[in-house]
């Protein structure tokens, strides 16, 4: 089966997940992370605080190296649900290497696997963080993702509307917007069908700059 990016960022619209959620109309809850109070999405089944902490730590670590981070959200779906994460791992490797080569700078990649039941097809909510002093557009990432799809069999990609965020180290407002969007990845729902042998998430290991 061939691969294709469903739509470009400017055109992509979805009504059944966080792509359609806006802070002004989405139920929120206040959480304390890193000594600050943040608004994150609220869900009937709750949120995984461990996962939320990991997401926040990813932002912290990256911003300790770069005063600006450009974060892009997109999704990866599989035509078959596999009991492992080999396809997303291969895809991630291709994308990260290409982005690092293009920008000659640090790249962070994260994904969270979701699957309602063993019978359901799994999908991954992903994000990349780029050096905000070198990246300010989704075009390069979009093109690299298209190239990666041609190299990994039977996967599809989707860039939602308003998928990019420029985060400034000393701007709580920009950090809040990105963390709110990422908090969707930490919801408890849609994760019950993951095979026991498969990891539920992956984040690039970036240590905090001392």
Image (cartoon, helix red, strand yellow):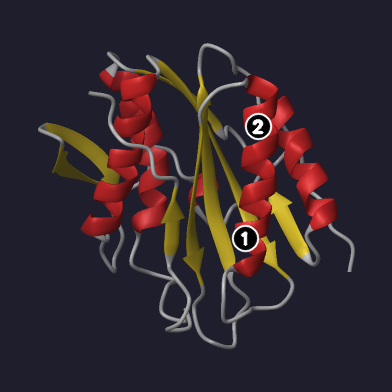
Q: Nearer the viewer, residue 70 or 11?
A: 70
Q: Residues within 10 Å of mark 2 (few under 14, many from 20)?
A: many
Q: Residue furthest front?
A: 210
| Disc assigned to residue 99 | 2
Q: Residue visible at 79% across and 52% down?
A: 149
Residue 21 appears in the rendering = yes
Asked whether, in this view, residue 50 is left or right of residue 160, the answer is left
Q: According to the image, label 1 marks what residue? A: 88
The quadrant of the picture occupied by the C terminus is top left
Q: Residue at x 24, y 38 (%)?
A: 39
**Which mark is drawn over residue 67?**
none
Residue at the extreme left: 35
Give the CA separation, mark 2 to mark 1.
16 Å
Could you say which is closer to the camera, residue 99 or residue 82?
Answer: 99
Give coordinates of residue 29: x percent, y percent. Answer: 21, 47
Q: Residue at x 77, y 48 (%)?
A: 148
Position of residue 30 in the picture relative to residue 158 (left or right): left
Choose top left, top right, bottom left or bottom right for residue 99: top right
**Upstream in sequence: badge 2 or badge 1:** 1
195 shown above or below 184: below
Tell me the quadrant of the picture where the N terminus can be found. Answer: bottom right
Question: CB under 8 Å between callouts 2 and 1?
Answer: no
Who's the residue at 65% across and 38% down the image?
97
Q: Secondary structure at mark 1?
A: helix
Residue 120 lies, in percent from the top left, at 59, 81
Q: Secondary structure at mark 2?
A: helix
For the question of whether residue 159 can be seen, the reply is no
**In terms of depth relative to the viewer, which is nearer, 175 or 199?**
199
Q: Percent from the top left, x then y, of residue 5?
A: 78, 48
């Amino acid at each position: 089966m061939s691969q294709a990016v469903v739509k470009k960022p400017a055109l992509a619209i979805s009504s059944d997940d966080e792509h359609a959620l806006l802070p002004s109309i989405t139920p929120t809850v206040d959480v304390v992370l890193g000594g600050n109070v943040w608004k994150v999405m609220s869900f009937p089944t709750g949120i995984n605080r461990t996962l939320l902490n990991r997401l926040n730590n990813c932002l912290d670590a990256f911003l300790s190296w770069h005063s600006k981070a450009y974060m892009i959200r997109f999704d990866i779906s599989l035509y078959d649900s596999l009991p492992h994460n080999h396809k997303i791992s291969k895809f991630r490797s291709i994308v990260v290497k290409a982005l690092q080569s293009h920008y000659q700078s640090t790249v962070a990649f994260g994904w969270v696997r979701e699957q309602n039941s063993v019978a359901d097809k799994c999908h991954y909510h992903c994000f990349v963080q780029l050096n905000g002093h070198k990246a300010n557009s989704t075009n390069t990432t979009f093109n690299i993702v298209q190239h990666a799809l041609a190299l990994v069999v039977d996967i599809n990609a989707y860039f939602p509307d308003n998928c990019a965020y420029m985060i400034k180290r000393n701007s709580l407002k920009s950090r809040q917007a990105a963390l709110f969007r990422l908090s969707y990845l930490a919801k408890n729902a849609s994760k019950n069908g993951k095979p026991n042998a498969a990891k539920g998430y992956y984040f690039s290991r970036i240590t905090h700059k001392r």
